[in-house]
Image (cartoon, grey):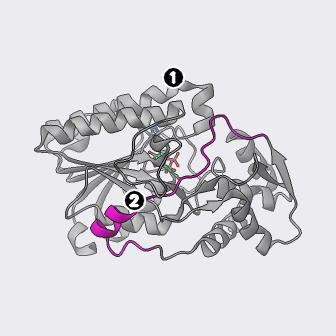
Amino acid sequence: MSDHLSGDRVLITGGAGFIGGHLARHLVAEQADVVVVDDLRAEPLISPEGTGKFLEKPVLDMTEQDVEGVRLVYHLASHKSVPRSFRQPLDYLDNVDSGRHLLDLCAGVGVERVIVGSTCEVYGQAETLPTPEDAPLSPRSPYASSKVALEMLAQAHQRAGGFPEVGVVRFFNVYGPGERPDALVPRLCANLLLRNELPIEGDGQQRRDFTYISDVVRKLEMLAHGDIAPVINLGSGHSYSVSEVVGFLRDISPTAETVRKPGRVNEISEFRAGTTLQDRLLAPSHISVDMATGVHETLSWWESRDMDDTRRRVLLEETN
Ligand SMILES: NC(=O)c1ccc[n+]([C@@H]2O[C@H](COP(=O)([O-])OP(=O)(O)OC[C@H]3O[C@@H](n4cnc5c(N)ncnc54)[C@H](O)[C@@H]3O)[C@@H](O)[C@H]2O)c1
């Protein structure tokens, strides 16, 4: 795969963020000519240095010049917090409008392929587990609704045919170093290092499908060439409950206490990806980093960071 990307110009929106940053650093190492677009509205926990040419601007300010000569675009820029989307729903319209603008630019200059980042949240409370790509969409938050709208725009481009070839990827829970603590694993890690009780929202039985970041980057790289599907799940096909994830951290730090917090609005009881399509198109798509190892790696990264307790506390408060 590395030979194929060598020299190709690849543009990553949201490339200063968690998934985009890891992808950008990986593709730079593979000799791709990487351009990152990010307006830094979310403060990166890993410096965007080494991620290629950096264009600090919102997607809506991009021009045709920015996509000229680009073969492949990963569109990962997004507001992505479910709870915040209930408090500030209008911000999430930007997810839709930015996607519309970017797809139009790419169609205008004939970019070959655009991979659009969506989420398992579009399924809502799925009736079928594991959930295949053709399950009904039933969003339960403004965030999930913005991604459904983004997917519909992508579909319009798919129906038009020609360029760009557009593929939607539905990420399930991606975790690892560099993710802000608005997600479960980094939130637990930051709390553990602050010697806080580990927060469990609701009954802790809600289940999520976790994939370590390096496995996700590998799958995204595979989508650079070859056949793509209109929509593909990027998940592991296995789920863990919140209490089980807490258990991985208590295996490392047995004296850690837990504390119950109120459950979330419209909480989904389980996400679990159907992986039939992924296994066919991205074989071998098996998970190379198991959950216990991934949680350990993430905690080690939080420990090794040049960050004092005050900064950890501020990050936790900011992302609440
Ligand atoms: N991390 C996960 O578990 C997960 C799960 C499901 C879906 N996703 C999706 O994957 C993508 C990447 O997620 P992430 O975890 O890396 O998020 P992130 O918040 O770490 O990164 C997103 C980046 O996009 C930037 N950004 C947001 N809107 C922008 C805009 N309009 N213009 C320019 N920059 C903008 C932010 O500054 C940030 O650096 C998103 O589309 C998200 O919805 C992620």
> Magenta part mainly helix, strand or loop?
loop
- Whether residue 31 is visible here, answered yes or no, is no
| Residue pointed to by mark 1 | 90
Q: Amino acid at mark 2?
A: Ala
**Callout 1: CB less than 8 Å from ligand 1:** no
Q: Residue at x 62, y 56 (%)?
A: 207
Q: Position of residue 27 (x, y in %)?
A: 35, 65
Crowdedness near tag 1: few (<14), some (14–19) or many (≥20) residues, C-alpha within 10 Å:
few
Residue 18 image position (x, y, % from top left) = 51, 54
Residue 276 at x, y = what percent? 35, 64
107 shown above or below 10: above
Q: Using the image, determine if residue 52 lies above or below residue 102.
A: below
Q: Is 282 a magenta residue?
A: yes
Q: Residue furthest top?
A: 90
User: For the point 19% across and 64% down, which residue is it?
Assistant: 226
Q: Quadrant of residue 219?
A: bottom left
Image position of 25 (left or right of 70): right
Q: Position of residue 155 (x, y in %)?
A: 25, 39
Which is nearer the N-term, disc 2 or disc 1?
Answer: 2
Residue 153 lies in quadrant: top left
User: To which residue does mark 2 refer?
Assistant: 24
Q: Can you say whether 118 is above or below 198 in the image?
A: above
- Residue for point 73% across, 57% down: 188
Q: Is 226 situated left or right of 183 in this image?
A: left
Three-letter residue code for mark 1:
Leu
Q: Which residues are magenta?
A: 262-286
Q: Quadrant of the N terminus?
A: bottom left
- Taking the magenta stretch, the answer to whether it contains residue 183 is no
The residue at 79%/61% (across/down) is 193
Q: Is mark 2 within 8 Å of ligand 1?
A: no
Element marked by disc 1: helix
